[in-house]
Amino acid sequence: MRRDENETPAYQTQVINVERQSEAGTIQAAKLIQNGEIVAFPTETVYGLGANGLSGEAVAKIFAAKGRPADNPLIEHVAKKSDVRRLWMRTPKFAQILMDTFWPGPLTLIAQKSECVPDEVTAGLNTVAVRMPLNKTARALISKAGVPIAAPSANRSGRPSPTTAQHVLDDMDGRIPLILDGGPCKYGVESTVLTLVGAPTILRPGAITREMLEAVIGEVRVANSILHPMKDGEIAASPGMKYKHYAPNAEVVVVNGEPENVARVINALYRQAEAEGVECEIAATEQTRHFYNGMQYTVLGDRNEPGTLCANLFTALREMDKRAERIYAEGIPADQEGLAYMNRLLRAAGFKMIEAE
Ligand code: TXA
Ligand code: MG
């Protein structure tokens, strides 16, 4: 989403490539954070939009720049494991072993918050989400800033999360002073969010899978909202789940089932839409691309490597959105990293899914 024509840019947004200017870039970004400003930075999942996580005033600027609903809490990012102590009231059961196994990395843990976490970060909840990113630039920035950095994904609210600095610029040009460009993100979907308040429950699936977590701590639940729309009156375990998310402007339709059946149904739908003058594109896989000769399609990767599909999803949605009014996307089995893929895809589709038989 571009800024409105009649809005005056608040900032001349600067982009610094940290592969070339790592030290200078992180120092400048850390100073901005210390001065209560907001900065976009790379992580291994998606780009984050960070502010001093101990300052409510600084964090408020994130919500303004993103157009984010005030009731959707942020994740605190730390540079070392011991930094989590000041943010949580106490370390809950399973937290230490999970941190030792998966940090630094794409796992966010939720526990009761301490006094020092501002209400702006948690949207008034008494819990706080924390993660220690794997990305070196992210960790260097947090260390240099000397404070935890509260950061959501650096997209305008409701848009697909940014996995390159260009995506951040497309959404945030003029709204933020600085973007650190660390190249494309490794995982391409946001971190796994696991609450440790009550029975361990995944609120948002990511590259650290349910199977990986269960191998360490035993049974892990998966919130119902991950693959199903919330019912009227249902209270969101994670406020972010309430919102239509990751959505391009194009209409997204998921077609699920055996690959050959999926391809046949997509073929029919595409031809019909084409006849009606609707510009379509297919989010295809290596295994099915040959079914789509003569049609517009993008191959996201191998069906058997859901991690690759995840890594390419948000870029593909942004690119297809420039060409198509409707996107037909193939569903995959919702286990391992396939759960994260189907979660993002279904939300982009507003849960519109056809079963191909
Ligand atoms: O990979 C990531 O997690 C990226 C990078 C930048 O670190 N960050 C990210 O932040 O995806 P965001 O704000 O887009 O998503 C945070 C999610 C939201 O769904 C939010 O509702 C949930 O975490 N969340 C945060 N704090 C929570 C809390 N105390 N209780 C329940 N859900 C919470
Ligand atoms: Mg987000």
Image (cartoon, rainbow, N blue to C red):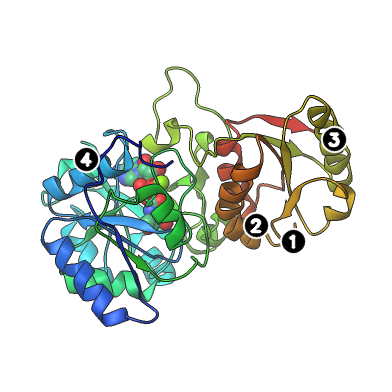
Q: Residue at horizontal 39%, vertical 26%?
A: 235
* Mark 1 and mark 4: Cα distance apart in space: 42 Å
**Which one is nearer the viewer's eye here, 6 or 203?**
6
Q: Are marks 1 and 4 in contact (CB under 8 Å)?
A: no
**Badge 1: residue crowd in 10 Å (few <14, some 14–19, many ≥20):** some
Q: Are marks 4 and 2 in contact (CB under 8 Å)?
A: no
Q: Are marks 1 and 2 in contact (CB under 8 Å)?
A: yes
Q: Residue at horizontal 53%, vertical 38%?
A: 247
Label 2 is placed on what type of residue? Leu
Judging by the rendered image, the residue that carries numbered circle 3 is 265
Sequence-first tag of 3 and 2 = 3
Sequence-first tag of 1 and 2 = 1
Sequence-first tag of 1 and 4 = 4
Per the image, label 2 sits on a secondary structure element best described as: helix
Judging by the rendered image, the residue that carries numbered circle 4 is 126
Per the image, label 3 sits on a secondary structure element best described as: helix
Quadrant for the N terminus, please.
top left
Residue 207 position, x and y percent, is 53, 60
Per the image, label 4 sits on a secondary structure element best described as: loop
Judging by the rendered image, the residue that carries numbered circle 1 is 302
Per the image, label 1 sits on a secondary structure element best described as: loop
Location of residue 38 by image quarter: bottom left
